Image (spheres, rainbow, N blue to C red):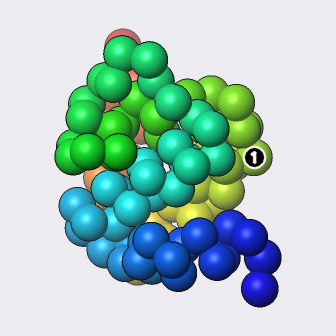
């Protein structure tokens, strides 16, 4: 088990659903030393959206992984239709 996995277990950060999942992800990236000095979007002690933004700015692979997940998930969630309507809006402008 990696140190990161041990930390997730120790801090009980394994819930990835809803707001708790976002808080847990913010706490994890903070533990990786991504800390927004202005505490932008503080959710609770030790968890702020700014930390997550700092992480994403420094890790384009994470953004690519999210984009790929969105693309793979889109047909199952109805996102394809939502984006389709926006494609037509762009073509008209």
Which element type, helix, strand or loop, lies under badge 1? helix
* Residue that carries the numbered disc 1 in the rendered image: 61
Which image quarter: residue 46? Answer: top left
Q: Residue at x 72, y 38 (%)?
A: 59
**At which x and y percent is residue 88?**
36, 35
Vertical relation: 79 (above or below) 5: above
Which image quarter: residue 42? Answer: top left
Q: Residue at x 36, y 16 (%)?
A: 38
Residue lying at the far bottom in this picture: please name it.
1
**At which x and y percent is residue 70?**
51, 60
**At which x and y percent is residue 82?**
30, 52
Vertical relation: 50 (above or below) 14: above
Q: Is residue 39 visible?
A: yes
Vertical relation: 77 (above or below) 44: below
Which image quarter: residue 68? Answer: bottom right
Count of marks overlaid on the render: 1
Task: Bin the neighbour count of mark 1 within 10 Å (Cα to Cα): few under 14, some 14-19, many 20 and up.
Answer: few
Q: Residue at x 25, y 30 (%)?
A: 41
Viewer-proximal residue, 31 or 66? 31
């Amino acid at each position: 088990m990696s140190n990161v996995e041990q930390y997730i277990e120790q801090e009980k950060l394994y819930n990835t659903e809803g707001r708790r999942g976002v808080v847990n992800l913010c706490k994890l990236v903070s533990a990786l030393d991504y800390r927004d000095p202005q505490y932008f979007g503080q959710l609770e002690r030790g968890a702020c959206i700014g930390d997550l933004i700092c992480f994403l700015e420094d890790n384009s692979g994470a953004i690519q992984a999210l984009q790929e997940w969105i693309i793979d998930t889109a047909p199952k969630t109805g996102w394809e239709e939502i984006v389709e309507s926006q494609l037509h809006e762009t073509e008209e402008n």
